[in-house]
Amino acid sequence: MTTPTPKPDATVASTQDGIVGGVNPLFLVVVGDGVFATSALPAQGLAVIGRAADSDVRIDDISISRNHAVLHLGTTLQVSDTDSANGTWVRDERIPPNTPTEIKINEAIRVGAVTVIVQRRAQKLRTRRLRTHGYFENRLEDECARAARHGSHFVLVHIVLDLGRSPAPTVTSLDDTPPATDRRRGRSKTDHDATPCPQEADVLELLVGVLREGDVVAEYAPGEIEILLLDAAPELMARVIRRLEAALISHHIDAQIGSSWYPRDGREPSTLAARVRARAHGTATEPTLEVGAIVVADERMTALHELVARVAAADISVLLQGETGVGKEVIADRIHRLSSRASKPFLRLNCAALTETLLESELFGHERGSFTGATQSKQGLLEIAEGGVIFLDEVGELHASTQAKLLRVLDERKLLRVGGLTPRSIDVRIVSATNRDLEAEVARGTFRLDLLYRLNAMSIIIPPLRERPNEIVALAQRFLDEIARKLQRSIPQISADALALLRSYSWPGNVRELRNMMERAVVLSTSDEIGVIDLPEEKMRMTFEASRQFWDTPAPMPAASSNGSWERTPPGGTMALPTPGRPSSNGWERPTGPLPRVAAPEGGDADDERQKVVDALESCAGNQTHAAKLLGVSRRTLINKIEKYGVLRPRKR
């Protein structure tokens, strides 16, 4: 345990671990025939060596007298023999009885047939560097981008300390660590290091022997530590987490640990962060807004929810499109609740979270013995959701073979389990979601056009939070109410300065980022008001001034066509779907014919938008993650714009 640095006018005589004036404590090494032990020594005074039960250092050896020798500890070290039968030997000479003889650290002394050595404990290993949450967020975004490029893995770990039950530091009276609020106020805007509280310092000391040098440790809030385990095989990272849990238990530190894995638990920073905190706090699933708690304070969202109500009544497949974190799962849940299938199951599956084999087993089910580990038959989600709705999130991540099998299921309304021989009829409605431009994926050959037709009987585009600014404050207050009740705290209000900052931020992580930010603000706040100090001010202000104009023109909402159906307004320069479907006597007909090409819009708007993308990339030396931040959009949206306008990525300087 790290002892806090004393104040300049404080004096320390001794402590429980034998430190005097900051000097490392002494201990005695005992080596003999079948004997090897160590024993702590006091910082000063006498220590009796002998075979008696009440000896300060008891050595159970026949050559040792009951009271054999005495160590004199202080500014100098001495040893004296107490007229023992077999004597005490220093530098190969037997010393006279009851005559203190000076010895040195690490010098061998023979008492009877046993050798003892006085040593000083080595300087404690330095503790891990504790980073700020802002630094951690930036690293997490960079690691998500890097892992997506290279197909690597990493793990996010969150530790919640029980500050009310964890052991107190050894010398509490000398602890001059400032309170959490003071620590946050005193931190420089360019400082990426946080000052740990005493309980966090204990954990940081443990992490020295558990984590690797390249792993990142940060303070989410007082008493909450977040860790990035980088560039390692999943098996190794699982062992690291088990070692961390064992170390906390062995040192009697009360804590809860949660983890989220890239890409199994998500590919976006806000998704991974929300899930790891939910698990650390004992919540089974990522928190979402209940349907009754949906906030609608924007004209575009009012129109969207009216559309959702009409679409829910028609038993057709729906494709939800929008940036990460805009609330696609909330809309999918609302479609289910407003549909005729509301009394039947609503099941969710993240298509990016599983390998191809596991995804097919989860979706279609499998028969016993169909693959290694399949010890019994299992129903797939398409069977379990019979009569209800299944929500396929991140459907753009489906592997080619899985796309083909899903298409057959949707065409025939029958499925074949993995390893099965008998098709099974199903009745299930598909609602899917993606933050990818699936038309562009079709053009690249990574997504099947016929499957897109099947999933896209109706397309609903959910606008990002920056395009519905009237909802920011209402959503923030709703999240504060929900989180404060969960933590059994009084519901805080948002200060005027904090409101202005929330309104000016571009929210690249959308509603999920807003919820994560409000949750952390409640944890950090020490009053009944959320102020700027409780928000990641540095991150929120690091935005191009030009980004406010970058998205001034909102993306058009789906417009009604002449036949009464709704169709997506195609983005310029990409392939657009024809009218998704039209009512007929047999229900909804599948559209036929080739997809038309839509030329990029001519004029200044497209040129201006392209130039802003180019300027952002050049100013960030080609780093897409940083350029997306400056533009106030998600990295996926920026990539779509780069592909749309054919922007070449500049070389890094």
Image (cartoon, rainbow, N blue to C red):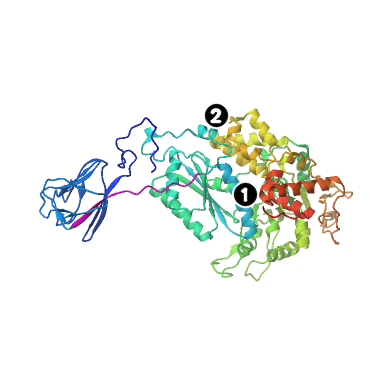
Mark 2 secondary-structure assignment:
loop
Q: Left or right: where does residue 573 sit relative to residue 264?
A: right
Q: Amino acid at mark 2?
A: Ser
Residue at point 31% right, 42% down?
Answer: 17
Residue at point 68% right, 60% down?
Answer: 398
Q: Which residue is mark 2?
A: 527
Q: Residue 180 placed where, x, y %?
A: 50, 34
Name the quarter where the N terminus is drawn.
Answer: top left
User: Is residue 284 in view?
Assistant: no
Residue 372 numbered mark, or none: none
Q: Amino acid at mark 1?
A: Glu
> Label 1: how many residues lie within 10 Å, few (<14), some (14-19) or many (20+)?
some
- Most foreground residue, 614 or 361: 614
Among the two numbered marks 2 and 1 on one chain, the one whose residue lies closer to the N terminus: 1
User: Is residue 10 in view?
Assistant: yes
CB atoms of marks 2 and 1 within 8 Å: no
Labels in figure, total: 2
Residue at point 74% right, 61% down?
Answer: 447
- Please state the extent of the stretch shown in magenta in the rendering: 114-130
* Spatial CA span between label 2 and label 1: 31 Å
